[in-house]
Image (cartoon, helix red, strand yellow):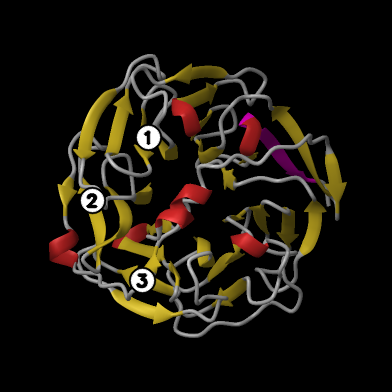
Amino acid sequence: MIPMLKLFFLLLFSGTVHCCQSQGAAIDVLHQGKETSLRGLFVLDDSVAWVSGGNGWVARTTDRGETWDWRQVPSHETVDFRDIQAFSTNEALIISAGSPAIILRTTDGGHSWQETHRDERPAIFFDGMDFWDDRTGLAYGDPIDGVMQLLATSDGGQTWRDISGQATVRLSEGEAGFAASGTGVRTLPGGHVFIASGGHKSRLFHSMDYGRTWTARDCPIVQGSASKGIFSIAFQDEYHGVVVGGDYQQDTLAEDAVFVTEDGGLTWAPPKRGTRGYRSAVEYINSKMLVAAGTTGVDISRDGGHHWDAVSDASFHIVRKAKNGTWVVLAGADGRIATFADRH
């Protein structure tokens, strides 16, 4: 997208965070104090989680956050790994932002990494990836010559196919994705996948055939400049979902920063009470409860996104729930990692 927009996300947010509790929900910091801004997060189960971020850092826990194994990927100490996908305690993928676009794979818990994709075009910029299962996945990036960049894999990220030309998802001038949390793309059973855009235009793109063909739906979230739009999406199924975002340059502005859909993006409803500003990640905790995180704090909804309440003023970039379990983890600047618990 616009270079200044991408440059912004290379900056770190700092600050001291302690335990916070509101509306029966609590956030407890597990780790902080690392020179990296974490935007990649994958929670495998109730014990194992992986994070990735700036300055080439990746970390893994196998004991529910009691200890973290931090490793700087060799020869990639200046790379910003914006998204991570884990398949097991030892297997994971990381994807970089900016040019060159790099995807690395580990099978030994992050001790070593093998490059599985590289794209050195100056305009390349990938925003995130998601998987239907341990083999089939999709990565997306900002448009080149107006076409969204799409990579597909059917072997767990060992090899990738460029399907951009086949899919031909066209974006308007100034429209692109945000590499804010890796949650601008979401896969669903049966080949469904949603991808969000922002900038001068915000839309929700939907494919029902693993990314081969797409439809686009306009979204009324705040938009019109490079700092505005949809930053994160979460879906229960192909119909029910929530989008969050706003304007990162004015991150306390709450107007038109959250919308709810019950028909896959055909129509949108604003919340009765929204988040307290810009949010870069949203996650379903159960069928009704969602957590949204951003630079000005964390909010919770208990009714599917229609009413939001403050949980914390602490800054986080990403929140994710365990793929196989109930553990909820947040991550952000300064190597900050925290756990979320609902005690309502």
**Amino acid at circle 2:** Leu
Q: Identify the image quadrant of residue 26.
A: top right
Is residue 185 within the magenta segment?
Answer: no
Determine crowd level at label 1: few under 14, some 14-19, many 20+ residues with C-alpha closer than 10 A: many
Determine crowd level at label 3: few under 14, some 14-19, many 20+ residues with C-alpha closer than 10 A: many
* Label located before the other in sequence (1 or 3): 1
Q: Distance from label 1 to label 3 (Cα)?
A: 23 Å
For this orientation, the residue located farthest to the front is: 4
Q: Identify the image quadrant of residue 17.
A: top right
Q: Position of residue 43 (x, y in %)?
A: 53, 37
- Which residue corresponds to the image point at 21% horizontal and 37% vertical from the top-left? 118
**Residue 113 vertical position relative to residue 136 in the rendered view, above or below:** above
Identify the mark at residue 151; answer none if there is no mark: 2
Which range is magenta?
A: 335-342
Is residue 339 within the magenta segment?
Answer: yes
| Callout 2 secondary element | strand
Q: Which residue carries the number 3 mark?
A: 205
**Amino acid at circle 1:** Ile
